[in-house]
Amino acid sequence: MIKAVRGTRDLLPPETALWNFVEAAVRDVFRAYNFQEIRTPIFEATELFARGVGEETDIVAKEMYTWEDAKPEEQMANGWLRRQSLIFRNALPSLSKDRPRWVVETRDTVFPLEAEIAPRITTLERLQSFSRLAREVRPNVRPLLLHSTDFAIGEQFRVEAERLGVELVGIEVDPPQRLTLRPENTAGVVRAYIEHKLWDRGLNKLYYIGPQFRRERPQKGRYRQFYQIGAEVIGPASAGSESPARDAEVLEMLATLLDRLGITDWNLELNSVGTPADRVQFNEALRKALDPVKEKMCGDCQRRAVTNPLRVFDCKVPEDQPIIETLPRITQFLGEDSRKHFDAVQDILRSVGVEFHTNDRLVRGLDYYTRTAFEFTHGALGAQNAILGGGRYDGLSEALGGPSAPGIGFAIGEDRLVMSLKETAESVLRRPDVYVAPLGAGMNGEAARLARELRRHDMVVELGDDGFRLKKSFEAATKAGAKYILIVGENEVKTDAFALKNLATGEQVSVPRAELVQKIRA
Ligand code: HAM
């Protein structure tokens, strides 16, 4: 049996009703704050995430679904060339220095070939099959350049090649484009902002709902395909994108949304991770503090201590935690502007009555954050307790080659949000108001006509089949959870009054066609 891939899952009814309930509330709330929907592709160029999210983050370093986007035959040719290059590179140490060298050049590699006659023939034979393959898949290939430091041997090679009928052509290996299933959506939104020059619109308030992909170890609340509901506020600073009012508005909107969904026991953790300028000093202090202790830490931390010390705070290894506890905190390094901004955000939150806690260990696992960073956690979620996370990314647009465009946003883990609802699928699902049961052969048409009328009045109607006996119709109606069953038999059609039975109370009445809607609604 073929099963859903590890870390992915099917969302089935009635569970999906909860997802719809959440998404309807989200769209309602976002509308009230004047956010509009954006839909970006599910895959993007790998480089977008490498540059946007950061090479040293767990997401980019370990968790992305990335592939090379080449046609199968191109993959074959490229693969062949790379394998050859590896073979020759591995053979290199055994080549003596005084022998003349052959060099094969492709656009991205240069590798020497053994120039002795016997290995040369193998090489030529390989080239023969390669040149055939190359011609088949890329008729317009550019020649592969073969150089020799020795003219005489070069000439021998040429003659030999001619004898074998080898055209000395190779393939130009354009590295195939690397693509990645999006692990998050902020980089994609900012890419779209730049690509479509959205700064012309001033301040952009955008939201998205959709799947994201990370190769994480699956567990409760953590999936390899998961869903995010996110929003981003981005635009030129002149449009107010940098104002602490935007940070506070986003946070207040989240509090409103969670309250509206009936999720009450959330906890907002707030920090400022400073500007890149603030972080220069902080990183230096971190490196200094890590230097004498990093040997005792996990491999990842040892690497991060050198390349990107802030990422040490992402470490989940229990043995490393006591060391991390002693490290300097960003709060001590915030410049005047960052400090003021952070204070202003907190003031507005107090003024609108949104509770929060500051947490100076919170740095978030993505490199683009600047200044405000936050997470909402929820007690009932267990180990994966972050229901959502976000923050400012004032330099992201520039890092992606765009103009200055400060921004702030968040993403809610929809899977986790649904897990923390008090509502049940049953409580939000709309079961059929009525099950229309045609009774006796030839009654399907009449029943369909009635069902159509009722559905026009915005009723949820399940329609049976005149092949069912009455008992089977009752069973089907009960299984569907219908409130009423409506019998459409010959007699009923003749008198234009229909037997309507309340499946909960057992009460049955005959109702004229014109009164059906009113009676079922009552
Ligand atoms: P993030 O913290 O990586 O931020 O993800 C946001 C939320 O997505 C998490 O708090 C969690 O609820 C959910 N999530 C993450 N990974 C998984 C997973 N494997 N399974 C289930 N849920 C998961 C971002 O993605 C940023 N783009 C947020 C943002 C938007 N920052 C600014 N704008």
Image (cartoon, rainbow, N blue to C red):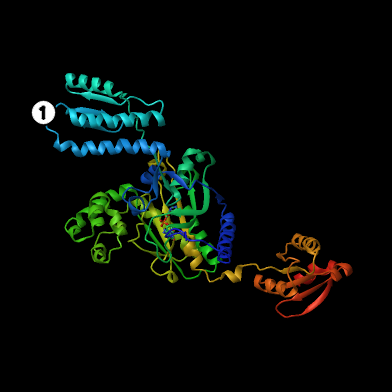
Dot 1 alpha-carbon crowd within 10 angstroms: few under 14, some 14 to 19, many 20 or more: few
* 434 on left or right of 197: right
Farthest front residue in view: 163
* Most foreground residue, 29 or 119: 119
- Report helix, strand or loop for mark 1: loop
Residue of label 1? 98
Residue name at image x 88 percent, y 68 percent: 494
Q: Is residue 115 above or below residue 501?
A: above
Q: Is residue 387 above or below residue 70?
A: below
- State the quadrant of the C terminus: bottom right
Ligand 1 picture quarter: bottom left
Residue name at image x 69 percent, y 68 percent: 432
* 142 on left or right of 387: left
Q: Is any part of residue 198 visible from this angle?
A: yes
Residue 316 position within the rendered picture, expressed as x and y whole percent measured from the top left? 30, 63
Residue name at image x 52 percent, y 49 percent: 206
Q: Which image quadrant for residue 514?
A: bottom right
Residue 123 position within the rendered picture, expressed as x and y whole percent measured from the top left? 24, 31
Question: What amino acid type should be assigned to the residue bearing mark 1?
Answer: Asp
Farthest right residue in view: 495
Query: For the residue with label 1, is its CB less than 8 Å from the closest atom of ligand 1?
Result: no
* Most foreground residue, 117 or 269: 117
Q: Is residue 25 above or below residue 57?
A: below
Residue name at image x 52 percent, y 38 percent: 200
Residue 141 position within the rendered picture, expressed as x and y whole percent measured from the top left? 37, 26
Residue 211 position within the rendered picture, expressed as x and y whole percent measured from the top left? 48, 54
* 478 on left or right of 290: right
- Number of numbered discs: 1
Q: Is any part of residue 247 visible from this angle?
A: no
* 285 on left or right of 134: left
* Most foreground residue, 333 or 116: 116
* Most foreground residue, 308 or 224: 224
